[in-house]
Image (tube, rainbow, N blue to C red):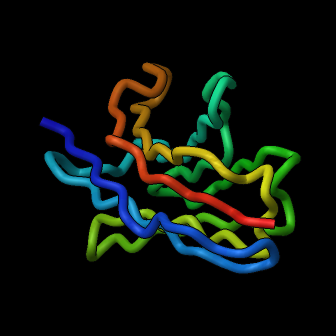
């Protein structure tokens, strides 16, 4: 049973930084792609960033390029989302998700709230 648990959300002023964590358990995640998504009030969930667990290949939404980075710690089975230069429009619930090869994102965490004040 795959479990993803996010943490690290909170309230921050515009221009500030936060680091979100996603603790993954239940299996070996080599071959998986780990992604972060977000959903703002009244909007659809959108892709933010992802990383291939084994190869380390990353993908970024244009809106976060140059500000957000993703990394993983194999020993801790944890994926991190470092968010810098935060903007009020980054306010959303952030979700961690896991996808095995071409199966799509089947596994999701419960989400963590990020609020950026202006």
Which residue reaches farthest bottom? 16
Residue drawn at (78%, 57%) of the image = 88
In this picture, residue 18 sits left or right of residue 98: right
In this picture, residue 16 sits left or right of residue 113: right
In this picture, residue 4 sits left or right of residue 93: left
Residue drawn at (35%, 66%) of the image = 78
From the top left corner, tell me how far across and down residue 116 is, in percent: 69, 63
Residue drawn at (79%, 72%) of the image = 14
Residue drawn at (28%, 48%) of the image = 4
From the top left corner, tell me how far across and down residue 48 is, in percent: 68, 45
Which residue reaches farthest front? 118
The tally of labels here is 0
- Place residue 82 in its image quadrant: bottom right
From the top left corner, tell me how far across and down residue 118 is, in percent: 81, 66
- Place residue 56 in its image quadrant: bottom right
* Quadrant in the picture for the N terminus: top left
Depth check, front residue: 81 or 56: 81
């Amino acid at each position: 049973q795959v479990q993803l648990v996010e943490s690290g959300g909170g309230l921050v002023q515009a221009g500030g930084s936060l680091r979100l964590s996603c603790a993954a358990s239940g299996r070996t995640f080599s071959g998986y792609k780990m992604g972060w998504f977000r959903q703002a009030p009244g909007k659809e969930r959108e892709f933010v960033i992802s990383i291939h667990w084994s190869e380390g290949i990353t993908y970024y939404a244009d809106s976060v390029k140059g500000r957000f980075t993703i990394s993983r710690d194999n020993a801790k089975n944890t994926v991190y989302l470092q968010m810098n230069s935060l903007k009020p429009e980054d306010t959303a619930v952030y979700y961690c998700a896991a996808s095995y090869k071409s199966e799509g994102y089947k596994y999701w965490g419960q989400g963590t709230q990020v609020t950026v004040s202006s």
